[in-house]
Amino acid sequence: MNDFMIQLAAFWPAVACGLVLVLTSAATAVAVRHHRTMEKDDVGDQLFWDLFAGAAVAVPAVLLPSLASPTAGVLVAAAGLASGIAAYRKYPRLAALQQQRRRRNTAMRGLGAAVERHQRTIETWRRYELDPALAIDFPAMSDVRRPETARLIRALRSAETVSPHEEPENYSQAVELLEHALRQAETAAGARPENQTAGTRA
């Protein structure tokens, strides 16, 4: 029992050092890969300090278990090296996932505004369909043979087919395209306020 406790007491410091080294190696590799992709004048300095900080933790994490057992030191060093290589290789994928998550969060924050803009755009278009005076003054807004009106109808359908909660980013883009298509159709039909003012002055 005493021998087992002695072996266990000698084993846990190596495990602790191994965990520290694995985390440090992964963090250092991520920092190095991140700074290598940045276009700055002081990238060399940043890389130096990344490696220096990593080495300041990694060297003691390898030496301490090596003093108790050379085999433990080799195993700890191998684990740290494997962790650093894996983190360095996986960083682009992780960065892409993080960027995608950030864009989704941004889109979710603006989802309420996008829904309001969508409804407002639909209401504006419906006035040209339901208001007799507008239908008479601007018949082009209902004429799908005109390319601008046809694009507007396609944009309306596209925005309706995208789920705001499942695809917030695509939904926001569809709403922007719809707003742009409505402005183009109104301009082509002479229904934009600036066109109406110009016509009045003429």
Image (spheres, helix red, strand yellow):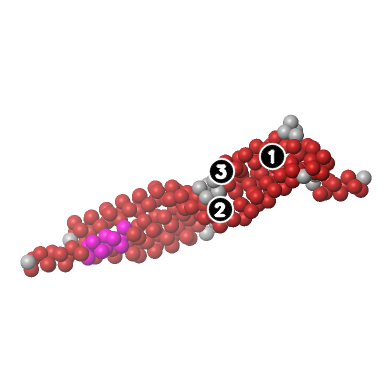
Q: Nearer the viewer, residue 43 or 72?
A: 72
> SS for tag 3?
loop
Q: Amino acid at mark 2?
A: Ala
Q: CA distance from mark 3 to mark 1?
A: 16 Å
| Circle 1 residue | 152
Q: CA distance from mark 3 to mark 2?
A: 14 Å
Disc 2: CA contacts within 10 A as few (<14), some (14-19) or many (>=20): many
Q: What span is in magenta? A: 13-22
Disc nearest the viewer among 3 and 2: 3
Whichever of labels 3 and 2 marks the residue nearer the N terminus, that label is 2
Magenta highlight: main SS:
helix
> SS for tag 2?
helix
In the image, is 58 to the left or to the right of 174?
left
Q: Quadrant of the C terminus?
A: top right
Q: Nearer the viewer, residue 158 or 139?
A: 139
Image quadrant in which you'd find residue 47: bottom left
| Circle 3 residue | 162
Q: CA distance from mark 2 to mark 1?
A: 23 Å
The reply to whether the magenta stretch includes residue 16 is yes
Q: Position of residue 126 (x, y in %)?
A: 71, 44
Residue 138 makes an appearance in the image: no
Disc 3: CA contacts within 10 A as few (<14), some (14-19) or many (>=20): some
Residue contact at pointers 2 and 1, CB within 8 angstroms: no
Residue at figure coordinates x 22%, y 65% from the top left: 13
Q: Amino acid at mark 3?
A: Val
Whichever of labels 2 and 1 marks the residue nearer the N terminus, that label is 2
In the image, is 112 to the left or to the right of 196?
left
Residue at figure coordinates x 79%, y 37% from the top left: 139
Residue 13 circle label: none
Q: Quadrant of the N terminus?
A: bottom left
Residue 107 circle label: 2
